[in-house]
Amino acid sequence: MANRLQCFTFDDHNAVAALQAICIYVLLRLSEADEDATNFDIPLISTMTGLSVKYNKSPTWEGWLLAESLRRLLFDLSPGTQQNCCDGARLLTQMGLPCHKNIWKAQTQNEWEWEYTAQYASKYQHLTFGDLLQHGKEEGSTGNVLDDWLANMDDFGTLVVAVLVRRLSDDVRQLVIVLSNNAKDSQRLKLLRLHLSCIENRTLNAESGASLNMMPQPRMYTSSLHNLSIPNVSLTSTVLSCPNIPQLTSHNPYRASPIMSDHRSHFPVHPVAHPKSIIGGSPSDKYRFTVLTPGLLRYEWAPDSVFEDRASVFALHRAQPVPPFRIITHPHVLELITTNFHLTYNLGESFAPSSLSAGIKGTFADHSSMWRYGEPSENLGGTARTLDDADGRIPLGPGVLSRRGFATVDDSESMLFDEEGFVATRREGEGRVDGYLFAYGHDYQGAVQALYTLSGKQPLLPRWALGNWWSRYYPYSDAEYLALMDRFAEEKIPFSVAVLDMDWHLVDDPKVRASGKTGWTGYTWNKELFPKPEKFLAELHKRKLKVSLNDHPADGVQSYEELYPAMAAALDHPTQENDPIHFDITSRPFLNAFFDVLHRPLEKQGVDFWWIDWQQGSYSRIPGIDPLWVLNHFHFLDNALGNKHPLTFSRYAGPGSHRYPVGFSGDTIVTWDSLAFQPEFTATASNIGYGWWSHDIGGHLHGYKDDELGTRWVQLGCFSPVLRLHSSNSRWNNKAPWTYGREAEGVMGDFLRLRHRLLPYLYTMNARSAIDGVPLVRPMYWVWPEERAAYKVANQFVFGSELLVMPVVRKADAKLRLGKTRGWLPGGRAWVDVFTGARYRGGRELVVSRGLDGYPVFAGEGAIVPLDGEAEPGNGGEEEVRKVEVWVVVGRDGAFEMLEDDGTGSRVEDVQWVKTSIKYEQASGKVIIGPTTGSQDPEHKTQDWSIRFLGLHTPDLHATLQTTPGDEPLNLNPEPVHNGTLLHLNAIPYSAQASISISIGNTNSAPVLTPTDPRKFIRPILADAQVEYKLKERIWGVVDADGEEGEGEEGKKLRMVSGLLALRGVGGSGEEEENLRDAVMEYIFAG
């Protein structure tokens, strides 16, 4: 009784220490062979019961964690004490359940507060062990909450279930089955059975020792316990392990935890395939095949017959529904047949072209589409790790597409993830093969969909990431940087991201030089440039700019860094000699400290995301672990804190990297050859599912100043996944538009503004990419795989679902001042240049020529493109769009669903979408806008709509507006514009639940695109051409001549072409004459 009363005098720390001492004693007694040793005296039970009243403490982080430790320790003691305490079962059933794993492993005060408020206090705080026992017997909200608890239990939660089953249930097997339905994977069920076995046997043998490592993990405190009546147990200060809670450890407030933070260790993984999808793989087999989809096969060879079921950085989700397939077994041959392929394998033989092959079904290839192991597949290419120092084309890694209908991914040497979410190496031993066959013929979309099925989809980017980024390697001061942002605002040039290159931290500083380092790595603000970092970052945020800091992490943490003492304390690193803390991303304590000690304080100051720059190479302390992979993976997971769309910014690490956007393509050289390769490089990356490259727009280093080159690069950037201006630390290399000539400055500004106007379209395509697996930028052959011409225009690409881009990547003709490019317009529809409004016939190859202010972007009949209706949108791009302009191309039906959200939800599945339908009906000439669904605001409405009919130049066009069915239509006044006809709806009130319709056209016919008048476009070409006046007159005479009666359109074109070829100086040889002829012919044949 004295012990029980004495326990009420303990403070929280001593109470926990007392229970830990009892816990150690119980475990030691359980391990003794004598069964009587497991009987405990009443004083011990009395002490434990007295301590039990202390588990429900006030909700402060430290107080709550102490209370939870008490709760877990009390339960840990219960297996050995219940049999000797008459009210043991009742006491246990009345105790509260342990907390959700996320709050137990919270890494920061803010994270704990969020988890406590959002989850624990509202859901689990009042749940008891008795509630868990009743689970499955009663319906209602408690059962649903318990379902959630079971689905998110940690290893200790598994132990709780096991002990409850053993002590308080008569039917162990039945409850195991019930609980296994809540288990996330077979490993969880395995752990549950292990705990059951451990408790059933009540011994700490080798197997149950593994269970001991999964016992509750509170911090071990030392205290004065000499008055407790406890058998001779040697107390120790050894820490079992605990969440990384700095406030709880008085002797070391920064110690990093060897346990991975929950938000960095938990991500969707389903690596073990369904047993019915597997062929081979028995203990006597060295081969194993897994049919993941009808067109996706995993093939493995293991000389020791030990196969790999852990997730790799490429293959996370092998647990797929079993697809239909057939197996035919012969004495020495295995046949595996699906709807997509017919595989043949010589049983027992190692993989070779002669032993393993597959015929790809379909009639898409002109020659044999037979895959043989190890032979090339005429791959259409994927992407590369970086464009560093690239001056033009570089070799590309493979994708999953091939004109022969098959492609492979070799996953034999990629990193793995262990059961705790950390990276792991492959099993040792030569000759292992782990590969994937993609057999989708020319269904290129299907092949990449299969890649996303196996590897995970591209995530949803935050809306602001699609706006303009400013970056420059230059030692700005805070005043200079803010003044620059204000200058952009004055010029009406919007931005959404402000990137600070490495000069934000100490670089050329006496302390850095004294250390013998170069200053590439740093985590201490340069106070000469940024004396008040928090104020500076707040000013950027006030300008609606997100902030990214450059980080070259490879040199670790030097002793001169402000955060060196905290990092040293976190890692128990000795500081007497000021030795640096080496970068070791394969160390879990270092990884935790890297984020929680180095990065988190800077993020609290206002940093939104990190630019992980080069330097660390592809090797780490552990062979097979690529530090770039580790950094990309954990940076992305860490950035999801706060329930936002996460983002990181780093180079490509290999197949599977699409899960960690945005990609940084490296330091490109400022040349036309560099520009010429980037469109193909960007589009082809989609062949490996990598859809979010960010290039140094304008090039980074070396090269030369060229206004035309800089302008064409910005134009390409406008139609790229990300538009980020960047340049080297040369004082002469600056991408601000006003540092170029007047014409280039104006055009750059126009396209930077257009980028922000395109945000409604871009964000919808971003959502489409994350939900449907369709990258924003794709090669032409994705959409037209059977057209030979689609493979000939490597630099041409589709931009979302509605637009087609032919980049200008070569210098203009000096006399014509026109840049030209060769392209192809698919058949089946007419196309419109969105900038000029010119109509083009489809189904043909062509040469297009554009002045510096033009760019070849086409929309086909039926296209619908929503834009921000503001001609000069502001910074940020996150606000709800209140003015929308819709581009519509008549000629065929079209439909578009514009998607918006509020920016919350770290996964696309968590997003609450607001969807607005926009349709065009060709037969009636009617545009229908709305209704809007998903809005939580019943007043959600756009204030102002306008519609631009591209390529429609009809003088007598009649247009009406109807906001309510049955009402009299209102007449609208069409406004002729350079590229079509514009209708303003004049801020018509529009309810989210309703729709409005706009009708155009004449009474008796639907609207059609206006045929291109060649003279309209040839006249300015000739006016600007630096050629003889006489030649201009002769060309114009041919183009402007009256035709013969009954000549027809085709006859008129032939007459003009014959006349031009007959002219001296146009039909002859020479590049200049060819360029002039191409420029004129483009519009003669446009259509």
Image (cartoon, rainbow, N blue to C red):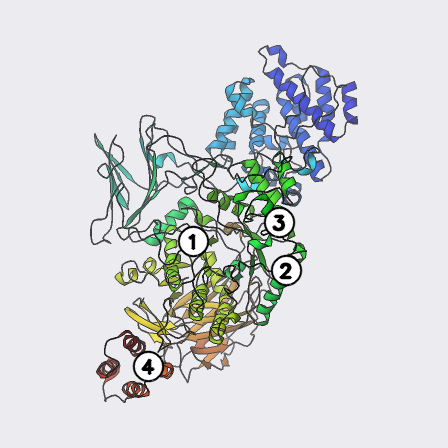
The label nearer to you, 2 versus 4, is 2
From what the image shows, is residue 371 above or below residue 390? above
Front disc: 3 or 1: 3
- In the image, is 364 to the left or to the right of 520? left
Question: Residue 769 placed where, x, y %?
Answer: 44, 55
Which residue occupies 30% across, 40% down?
Answer: 325
* Residue annotated with mark 3: 510
Secondary structure type for disc 1: loop
Q: Position of residue 151 (x, y in %)?
A: 54, 37
- Spatial CA distance of label 2 from label 1 is 29 Å
Q: Which mark is residue 478?
A: 2
**Residue 144 visible (yes or no):** no
Q: Do labels 3 and 2 touch, CB within 8 Å?
A: no
Label 4 environment density (alpha carbons within 10 Å; few <14, some 14–19, many ≥20)? many
Q: Earlier in the sequence, mark 1 or mark 4?
A: 1
- In the rendered image, the quadrant that contains the N terminus is top right
Is label 3 in a helix, a strand or a loop? Answer: helix
Secondary structure beneath label 2: helix
Of residues 926 and 267, the one nearer the viewer is 267
Residue under circle 1? 388
Residue at the disc numbered 4: 1014
Q: Amino acid at mark 3?
A: Pro
2 or 1: tag closer to the N-terminus? 1
Answer few, some or many: residues within 10 Å of disc 3's Cα (few below 14, many 20 plus, some between 14 and 19): few
Residue type (three-letter) at the residue carrying disc 1: Asp
Q: Which amino acid does the dot numbered 2 rest on? A: Asp
Q: In the image, is residue 3 above or below residue 309? A: above
Label 1 vs label 4, nearer the camera = 1
Task: Indicate whether 369 appears above or below 591.
Answer: below
Q: Is residue 33 left or right of residue 245?
A: left
Q: Is residue 941 visible?
A: yes
Question: Where the C terminus falls, by quadrant?
Answer: bottom left
